[in-house]
Amino acid sequence: GIQVEQSPPDLILQEGANSTLRCNFSDSVNNLQWFHQNPWGQLINLFYIPSGTKQNGRLSATTVATERYSLLYISSSQTTDSGVYFCAPTGAGSYQLTFGKGTKLSVIP
Amino acid sequence: EPEVTQTPSHQVTQMGQEVILRCVPISNHLYFYWYRQILGQKVEFLVSFYNNEISEKSEIFDDQFSVERPDGSNFTLKIRSTKLEDSAMYFCASTGRGSGNTIYFGEGSWLTVV
């Protein structure tokens, strides 16, 4: 199956700082989603982005499918951004999202 | 915004007991999924379900697991004889168009096997 690597595994930011999270995947994909898992364990959809660039407020994401990576940008980080960010692509012909190990983000005041 | 709902939010069960986790997917969705997350680990795929049958399953989804859509709204995961290692958060998810569309997750059911 598809392999997913996320980096960095841990990230500590001062409130107001910007960051870039990276997701590399091993095969072509027909779906890729970014999630934020909050401290209560809920998985919050951030982006559905199999290709191209999308923006939603302080967050944006870019997927370059031909080069097999996706990036999540967080600008002007806030303490409520803390949690684990997961990248999850779906390989061609498959129905399952394959999650990476995540990036654990801690935003400190 | 429509959402996937799961019950119970938390269940504690004795080892060897049967557990049923329930999910109500988004009403016009056609593809349903179960995932699990052991504490501190990544989210793992268990099974996908479409048109009243399993379309994909992982190695984790062995004979002790089963899924069912008993009526037009519910989607259930049954664990026949729970083991300690089944302790995890179980997420239900649904989507309207299979692998090419946004998959929406419920809030999860936390299962603790003692």
Image (tube, rainbow, N blue to C red):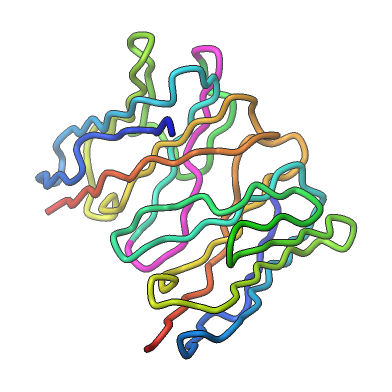
- Name the quadrant of the C terminus of chain B: bottom left
Between residue A39 and residue A76, name the one nearer to us.
A76
The single residue placed furthest to the top in the displayed view is B71
- x and y percentages locating residue A12 in the rendered image: 48, 88
In the rendered structure, which segment of residues is drawn in magenta? B39-52
In the drawing, does residue B12 fall left or right of residue B44?
left
- In percent of width and height, residue A45 lies at 51, 50
- Residue located at (49% from left, 31% from top): B94
Q: Does residue B43 show up magenta in the picture?
A: yes
Which residue appears at 45% of the width and 45% of the height? B60
At 28% from the left and 29% from the top, the residue drawn is B22
**Does residue A34 appear left or right of residue B83 in this picture?**
right
* Position of residue A99 measured from the top left corner of the image (x, y, whole percent): 56, 56
| Magenta stretch: includes residue A81 | no
In the image, what residue occupies the spot 65% across and 67% down?
A72
> Is B49 drawn above or below residue A72 in the view shown?
above
**On-image quarter of the N terminus of chain B:** top left
A77 vs B40, left or right, is right
